[in-house]
Amino acid sequence: MIDTNDRCILTVCLPDAADAADSADVPLWRAKSAREALSILRLAQIDLMFTALHLPDMSPWQLVRRLRASARSPRWALVASDLSPMQEIEARSLGAAAVLERMPEPQTLLAMLASARRDALVIASTTDALHAVRHRAPARAAVALATDQTF
């Protein structure tokens, strides 16, 4: 059962990812396909997703495009040792936070997770401020946007 309060990492078709996550003491969800990843993302708060280049049911580009169309779109990274320059360009154009040859070391993984959480907080505070503008609180929203604070 998925605990919807956990914020964690999701790996897609990366069987060796558990070592880095275990060493960093980070909650980890593993998906064996893109469809399974989409199901997990509907239920759990995922801060960072690592995906392989070769998925059994769709390309990583299709997966990321589906995520971007949904309300829950975590930061993501591509992990592939056989990446062409064009594939790296495609990954970066779709917003990859990183393109890696292998899963990062535990310290790097923790830094990436912290960065993803900070970005999520900034987005949430901006969204709260914009919501206030639409609902008759323009002065408070302007202060929130200017100071990057929620209210």
Image: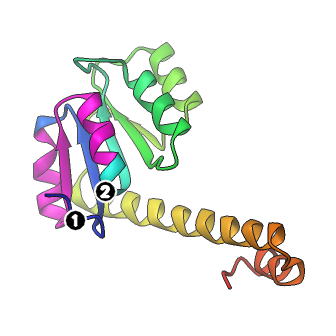
Q: Nearer the viewer, residue 66 or 12?
A: 66
Q: Circle 2 sits on which residue?
A: 44
- Tally the marks: 2
Give amino acid for label 2.
Ala
Relative height, residue 9 to residue 59 (above, below): below
Q: In the image, which residues are magenta?
A: 16-41
Q: Quadrant of the N terminus?
A: bottom left
Give amino acid for label 1.
Asp
Q: Circle 1 sits on which residue?
A: 3
> Residue at the spot x=46%, y=37% of the render?
67
Relative height, residue 97 to residue 108 (above, below): above
Please tell me how crowded label 2 is: few (under 14), some (14-19), or many (20+) other residues with Cα within 10 Å.
some
> Residue at the spot x=22%, y=28% of the render?
33
> Residue at the spot x=28%, y=62% of the render?
107
Q: Main secondary structure of the magenta part?
A: helix
Q: Secondary structure at mark 1?
A: loop
Please report contact status of discs 2 and 1: CB closer than 8 Å, yes or no: yes
Q: Tell me how far mark 2 sits from mark 1, CA to CA.
A: 7 Å
Q: Secondary structure at mark 2?
A: loop
Q: Nearer the viewer, residue 19 or 66?
A: 66
Q: Is 44 on the left-hand or right-hand side of 132?
A: left
x then y, percent, for residue 44: 31, 56
Q: Quadrant of the C terminus?
A: bottom right
In terms of image quadrants, where is residue 148?
A: bottom right
